[in-house]
Amino acid sequence: MREKIALDPDGFERRVAQYAEWLRVNHFSEATASSKRKYLKPLVRWSVDRGITRPVELTRPILERYQAWLFHRRKESGEPLSIASQRNHLTALKSFCAWMARQNYALYNAASEIPIPRLSRRLPKFVLSAPEVERVLSLCDLRTPLGIRDRAILETLYSSGLRRMELVALKLFDLDHDRGTLMVREGKGRKQRTVPIGERALRWIDKYCREVRPGLVVPPDEGHVFLTQRGGPFEEGSLTEHVRLYVRRAELGKPGAVHLIRHSMATALLEGGADVRYVQAMLGHEKLETTAIYTHVSIRKLKEIHTLCHPARPGPRRKK
């Protein structure tokens, strides 16, 4: 059965492969193409198990049944799929069906009226204070080359607020030491932006590039700033686990990794008085509402202002 589907020119495997190739040709990132294929796999398995071997056979009632299946689906842990995960599956489905219709592989877009569940804006669960971040940074063993590299990585993350994919893709020519900036060329949605980076982080990057990187690089050198022991760039998953290890060792009771550092940087900027629009530009958020969640996290600064300014604050005690 599986072999017949793989050989069928109108079968799921063929069409999904064509869709992924179309994304690449139209300048979507490799990460986007891989993500779409990943989230379409359950749809293919679900359909084939029900005797549906070609995507052209999909109809709205069938897709509504698939949506209900996603809602009731349980992971190995017994937990349901999160709303975000359900959204990712359904977004991939809608994009694929729209592509099928545009390419005339289907007479109509069967998923055009499938609703996408709304995703509530959740506050970051944990944020590190400045002393807590310094605690994490201090755990790098500076007596070793990899400890110096890791300190440079953590300093870069905290200073610039880069996403993990952005740090992995960072190259030597993206750094401007004179201006104190770095260029993000492979940001989310393939959008470029220039991000300021602090002098302390640049000093650690410079130390790493002079003392450590030459011993890690394996020709041909593609210019990635941060390299693994094997001489190549980090993979996103391995970078996450690497940073998570330092956060765990700090024993702060606040689990997290790269995004925890990013959240902490954004919150620190806002608490320090930065305008939310500048923070939006630095983080590379398309919508201001995405950045605005950090204004709710900055409750400590709001509490200080409330205590100083509210008219009902307690005055000095009178002497009896």
Image (cartoon, grey):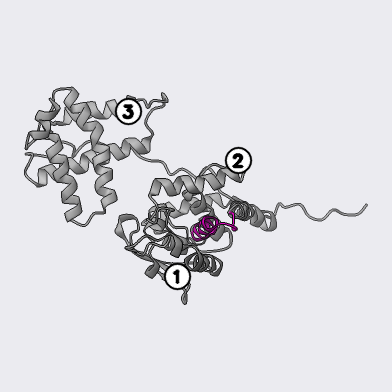
Mark 3, Cα crowd under 10 Å, few <14 / some 14-19 / many 20+, is: some
- In screen coordinates, is 205 left or right of 237? right
Between 101 and 10, which is closer to the camera in this rendering?
10
Residue occupying the point 26% across, 30% down? 67
- Residue 45 part of the magenta-drawn span: no
Question: Disc 3 to disc 2, how far (Cα)?
Answer: 32 Å
Cβ atoms at labels 1 and 3 below 8 Å apart: no
Tell me the tag on residue 181.
1
Q: Which residues are magenta?
A: 141-156
Most frequent secondary structure within the magenta stretch: helix
Cβ atoms at labels 2 and 1 below 8 Å apart: no
In the rendered image, the quadrant that contains the N terminus is: top left
Residue type beneath disc 1: Thr
- In screen coordinates, is 21 left or right of 198? left
Tell me the tag on residue 253.
2
Residue type beneath disc 2: Gly
Residue occupying the point 76% across, 52% down? 314
Residue type beneath disc 3: Phe
Q: Is residue 11 above or below residue 181?
A: above
**Residue lying furthest right:** 320
Q: Mark yes or no: residue 1 visible.
A: yes
**Residue lying furthest bottom:** 178
Q: Position of residue 95 (x, y in %)?
A: 21, 44
Mark 1, Cα crowd under 10 Å, few <14 / some 14-19 / many 20+, is: some
Instruction: Locate residue 104: give its quadrant.
Output: top left
Q: Position of residue 24 (x, y in %)?
A: 20, 53
Q: Mark yes or no: residue 285 visible.
A: no
The residue identified by callout 3 is 71
Of the image marks 2 and 1, the number of the one nearer the N terminus: 1
